[in-house]
Structure formats: structure tokens, C-alpha cells
Amino acid sequence: MSVKSLVSISDYSKEKILQILEKASAFEKNPNQKILDGKVVATLFFEPSTRTRLSFETAVNRLGGRVIGFADASTTSGTKGETLKDTIKMVSNYVDLIVMRNPIEGAARYASEVASVPVVNAGDGANQHPTQTMLDLYSIQKTQGKLDNLKICMVGDLKYGRTVHSLLMAMSHFNPTFSFIAPDELKMPDEYKMFCKKNGIRYEEHSELSENNIADADILYMTRVQKERFTDLFEYEKVKNIYILKNSLLEHTKANMKILHPLPRVNEIEQEVDENEKAYYFEQARNGVFARQAVICDLLGL
Amino acid sequence: MEKDIKDKKELKVAALRNGTVIDHIPSDKLFKVISILKLSNCKCQMTFGFNLESHKLGKKGIIKVADKFLKQDEVNKVAVLAPNAKINIIKDYEVAEKKTLELPDEINGSIKCINPKCITNNEPMQSKFVTIDKEKGLFKCYYCERVVKSEDLIIE
Ligand SMILES: [Zn+2]
């Protein structure tokens, strides 16, 4: 297919990433425009994700476009028993762009092959969720004034967390230093550490979220440590309280440091941290609208 | 005397007039090679040797296919499973060409993704793997992006 889509963050070059971030910044200054006037966007959510869907739909609505779609495939008889290919072919006839979330991994890549309009992957199982990465990058750039030469601390589930993997790949263009802080069972997989070595990216590994280990971070990227990920529940009991961020841990961090989290959080960031000026996760979510406006308009050549 | 005994231990596989010989296949890979080349759908005459004595491999497998000349993309599929196999094209009882095995850049079909949540295992469609490291034998599912070592590939 010659139609452009956004399936994986690696579909974007460094230049493209910077171009999209610039576009996102323009949308932040002026989020209500009529540039999608007359366009229809489908949001096909084969599994529910209210947060992501509302963000995409807000992005389209603020630009004057219209949205059709479904929020949960199990309530949509029209898609039952039908192949993904047939659903995508049908919807392609109606809309200018498809936003799809699907628990099946690789579904977005396949949809982009069979669709006659651009497809934006809004999450395909444990695989990719590139607009999350774009809003993370946008948040980093906005709070630090740059993307280059930053120290990024990633905390929590670094084994299964797709957001940290995609962020690692995307940040690799900007000479970062990484610190991976995770319990032994949820360490950063070897393939990503090999990727760092191959590309001359410095990283350190720690198994404890301590004041010392985050002292020189510019970005503290928190993720949730889920009980279900542990084969050994004893191991979970041991680590569950070490990975909770409290104000007391933040006292000696750098003044420019910001805390990001892809949300939803459960208990890995104490409520008291919300009032800390270093907390950025709610603004981060707001940035998602601008990043998605930029991605959609870019794919439509607008 | 000793030589005679050794000769008798070697199972003779019929000579081939025209066709392809795939030799030095590790025994445990023989049936996978047959499968990846889809030889069971082939009408040609074939001889398979299984668990033959081999100094190098311990037990080896051999495939002789009459009147079929493997093309380079088929040779490359064999490389996925048995990188040290020897493939010779035979014409009129003579070795007409020795094929060089090289991992393909891409494998379409024949391999099943190990990820049960992969779209290729949930839709009537062909799988596709991209070779990401020829030396280490690492392959990536083009769709779910799962990376698999060559020994863990599931051949359909
Ligand atoms: Zn796959």
C-alpha cells in the first residue's frame, strides 16, 4: 500500500519526529482550527480504552472533523465473526483516516496493508502505541526545552512495558543516558540493552528506587508494577512497596526534573506527589491531544 | 577388512540423474526441511535418508529430489533451518552447481509466529518474517514484531 500510516514509532525518522513535535507545538498554541472540516475519522476500538479514545476524538473534534466508530467490539454485532480485513475494507470506504486499537498484536500493521486510507495505531496488544511515545517526547521537549543529552530514568515494569521500550527507541536519536530501575523479574530485556550498546547509548541498571538512583535524572518515567506480571508472588510482596514514589524521595532531585507516567496509575505515585511542582503526568496527558492532532494532520498531508 | 565393515554401515541412497541433493541436514531438521520446501505437495520422485551416520553431525539427513532444481529463494529457506547443509544441483549424474546458502532477507509463509496473540494466528493470512541478524539467526515477525531465534521457529 502506498498510503502512509503510523503503526510503530520506528516508522518515524528523527527528522519526522522533530517535524511532528513542531506541529504539535503549533496546535497547542492554537488547538481550535477548522482544518479537518469535512473530514471523517473512524475510531475503531476492538478493546475499550476510554482515555486514548477520548484523546483522539478530542483531537479530531477540535480541528472540525467528525468521528464515527465503536468503543468496544464486544458490543458491536457488526464486527462479530468478521475478519479484520473485511471490517477495515468496509470502514475504508467511509472515512478519511482510521484510528484503531486492537488487543491482537500486529493488527495495526495488517490493517495498514489492507486499508485504502491512513491507519493510526492506538495500541495493538503489548506491541506498539506510537502516539503515546509522541506525547511523551513532546512532554520531554516542552519541560526540558530540548531532547538532546538528557538523563532519563525509567522505573517499574521495564520488561513488559511497551511505553518504555518505544520511548527508548525514540530517544535513541537524541544521545540520552538511561537509568533502568526495576525489580529483577521485570528488568529491561536484553534486546533493548543490546540495542543501546550497539548505538553507543549509556545506561545503568538499579533494582531499587532510591534518592541516590534518581538524583541526576532530568526525566523520571514511572510505570506500574503489576501483580499479575510476577510468577513468584513472594517476589512481588518484596518489591511492591519499594517502587512507590513519595515526596521524600524527590527532595534532592534536579530542579528541572519532571515526573512522567503513561497513566492510569494505581499506587506507584503517592497522591501527595500530585501537588509537587515536579509532577507532570496530568499535563502530559493533555499534551496527547496536540501530539495526535499533529500525527493525524501529517498523515492526511495537511 | 575394516574398510569393508565401514562401507557396509553406510546406507546407499540411489544415485540421481537430474535433480537436487540436499546433504548434511541435521537429522532433527530433516522433516522441517521437507515441510518448509513443501515437498509433500511435489509430484517428483524423492528419496529421504534419516539418521545416517555422519562424522560431522553424528546423525544426518539427506534429501534427493529428481527433476527438481531448487531456486535461490528455496535454497535460502533451507538456510533458515540448516545453515550448514550442502545443496548440489545434479545434471546427468554430475554436480552441475553447488548452491551457496544464505539466510533470506524475508520469509513469506511457511513459518508460524510463536505469539498466539499475533494477527497472523488470528486472521486467514500469510505470515512474514524479516531477518534481523543473519549471523545470530534472529528473525522478527513483520506484524507483531516478536523476535525469534532460528531454533525456535515453528515450521508449518
Ligand atoms: Zn507475529
Image (tube, coloured by chain):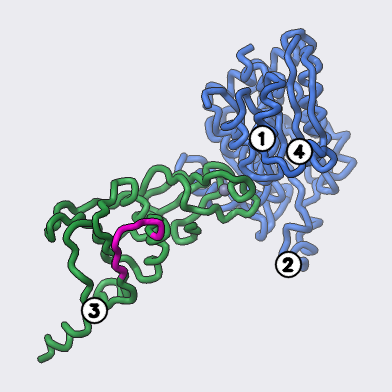
Chain colours: A blue, B green
Residue B66 tag number: none
Residue that appears at 89% across and 42% down:
A271
Percent x, y of residue A57: 80, 24
Q: Nearer the viewer, mark 2 or mark 3?
A: 3
Task: Tell me the residue that label 4 is attached to.
Answer: A79
Along the viewing direction, whichever of B35 and A68 lies nearer the viewer: B35
Residue that appears at 56% across and 37% down:
A169
Disc 2 with disc 3 on a shared chain:
no
Q: Earlier in the sequence, mark 2 or mark 4?
A: 4
Task: Tell me the residue that label 2 is attached to.
Answer: A232
Task: Tell me the residue that label 3 is attached to.
Answer: B11
Residue A86 tag number: 1
Residue density around tag 2, few if under 14, some if 14–19, many if 20 or more, within 10 Å: few
Residue that appears at 66% across and 35% down:
A86
Q: Which residues are magenta?
A: B40-48
Percent x, y of residue A77: 82, 39
Residue that appears at 40% across and 56% down:
B41
**SS at badge 4:** helix
CA separation, marks 1 and 4?
9 Å
Residue density around tag 4, few if under 14, some if 14–19, many if 20 or more, within 10 Å: some
Tell me where residue B19 sits by quadrant. bottom left
CA separation, marks 3 and 1?
54 Å
> Does residue A290 appear in the picture of this structure?
yes
A4 w.r.t. A187: above or below:
above
Q: Amino acid at mark 1?
A: Asp
**Which chain does the residue under circle 2 lie in?**
A
CA separation, marks 2 and 3?
52 Å
